[in-house]
Amino acid sequence: MKRFIVSPKSQSWVKVAPDSHFPIQNLPFGVCLRDEEETSVAVAIGDQILLLLPLQEAGWIGQELGLLEDLTEISPEELSGLRKEIFDLLRDGNPKLRDNKGKRDECLFPLEDAFMVHPMHITAFVDFYSGIHHARNVGKMFRPDMPDLLPNYRWLPVAYNGRASSVVVSGTDIPRPQGQQKPAEGDPTFGPTRELDFELEVGFFIGTDTEMGDMIPVNEAEDAMMGVVLVNDWSARDVQRWEYQPLGPFLAKSFATSISPWMVTLDALEPYKVQGMTQDPAPLANLAQKDKGHYDIHLEVQIQTAKMTEPETICVSNAKHLYWSFAQQLAHQSSNGTPLESGDLYGSGTISGPEEGSYGSMLELTWRGTKPITLSNGETRTFLEDGDTLIMTGWAQGDGFRIGLGEVRSTVVAGR
Ligand code: MN
């Protein structure tokens, strides 16, 4: 698929600050709730949101597409074409929308006034485990007498099936889940988790349906993807530790997953592709990707407790630390011929870097609670407490601009 890359020199007539996540080189897609029930596909530009439905109704864009109320019926290739049309309307020097105050008032307004819903209707949520530094840390903590990676890790992208119904958009509070926990001594008990954690991840949506029996070849897998979002894969570690053997995580993960509202296209991220780390052993043929498949996306996690007035950074990492690429993940998912649906969301797995300070979960940052972190106001944390707000952000750094993923922000509240 030919990707539409906006020149680094291009500018928009909409003002964009240098540290904005949404310059004209980005143009990410989301879905905005306009009033009670009506939604419109939208694009972020600077600190503004551009609604696409009114532009389509006026015959300015997307005439060959379905009604631009959501992104379900649009293929990745059509999305790329639509982005090109929007670029043309927003580029410096094109007066068509710039000088039409009536139309502008109808479709362009501040992002802070927009209520964003899921960028796609989520049909399935799968979470991979492709952050190798995270996998190693977990191995060291939980299986100290064994090699840190299990034997399958470098042969296939390990994953589990999560729940689509509990994927929520940034801004949604997370009620502390209850579950069964097994103390070191004595019988299990049921109650609110005492080890609520976050996982820093990046996820991709697909925009392609496949039939049962179909496989997506690894070197065509990126053509099936709509774009990427930030993912916080909430985890209850005490519940997880007790329930996960032998079938993997179940209730410890499926209570909530938070995503950022803006889907950043692979077109926008194409200039930031990098070669991943060496894969040894060489992947089997169906997972062997010819071209670069990883992305240089700077990632940060911040916490703001109820007592803090400003958020504080607790993790700095990068998407390039993944062992398996998005394309390898999708090729693996489809390799048994299961039907895939437009709207499936795939989380990468926790993206920890190699050193302390780059770990993408409290589990690792506090080394299983043995090394509490001290915040600047003197508070300490092992896991998350009610009232804590967790913020994830990320961007690819261009020359004088950022291809940003925006943020995913959620506050932990007491369970019901
Ligand atoms: Mn995860």
Image (cartoon, rainbow, N blue to C red):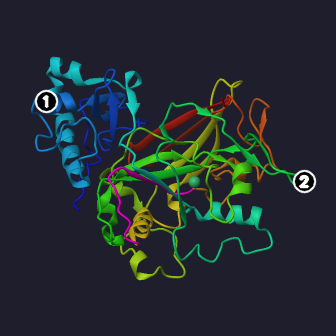
Q: Are marks 1 and 2 in contact (CB under 8 Å)?
A: no
Closer to the chain start, of discs 1 and 2, is 1
Is 168 contained in the magenta span?
no
In-front residue for pair 140/376:
140
Q: Is residue 341 magenta?
A: yes
Q: Quadrant of residue 275?
A: bottom left
Question: 220 or 167: which is nearer to us?
Answer: 167
> Which numbered disc covers residue 185?
2
Residue 141 horizontal/vertical position (percent):
76, 61
**Where is residue 174 shown, x and y percent of the image?**
59, 34
Q: Seen in the image, is 93 located left or right of residue 335?
A: left
Q: Nearer the viewer, mark 1 or mark 2?
A: 2
Looking at the magenta stretch, what is its main secondary structure? loop
Secondary structure beneath disc 2?
loop
- Name the residue: 21% across, 41% down: 87
- Residue situated furthest right in the rendering: 185
Quadrant of ligand 1 in image = bottom right
Q: Which is nearer the eye, 96 or 106?
A: 106
The numbered dot on residue 255 is none
- Residue type (three-letter) at the residue carrying disc 1: Glu
Rendered location of residue 48, percent (x, y): 33, 27
Q: Which residue is mark 1?
A: 57
Vertical placement of residue 307 versus 243, above or below: above
| x, y percent for residue 10 | 25, 42
Q: Residue at x 76, y 29 (%)?
A: 377
User: What amino acid does circle 2 point to?
Assistant: Glu
Q: What quarter of the picture does the N terminus occupy?
A: bottom left
Q: Residue at x 52, y 73 (%)?
A: 156
- Horizontal placement of 178 versus 338: left or right? right
Q: Can residue 365 be seen by looking at this rendering?
A: no
Q: Which residues are magenta?
A: 336-349
Report whether 41 appears left or right of 362: left
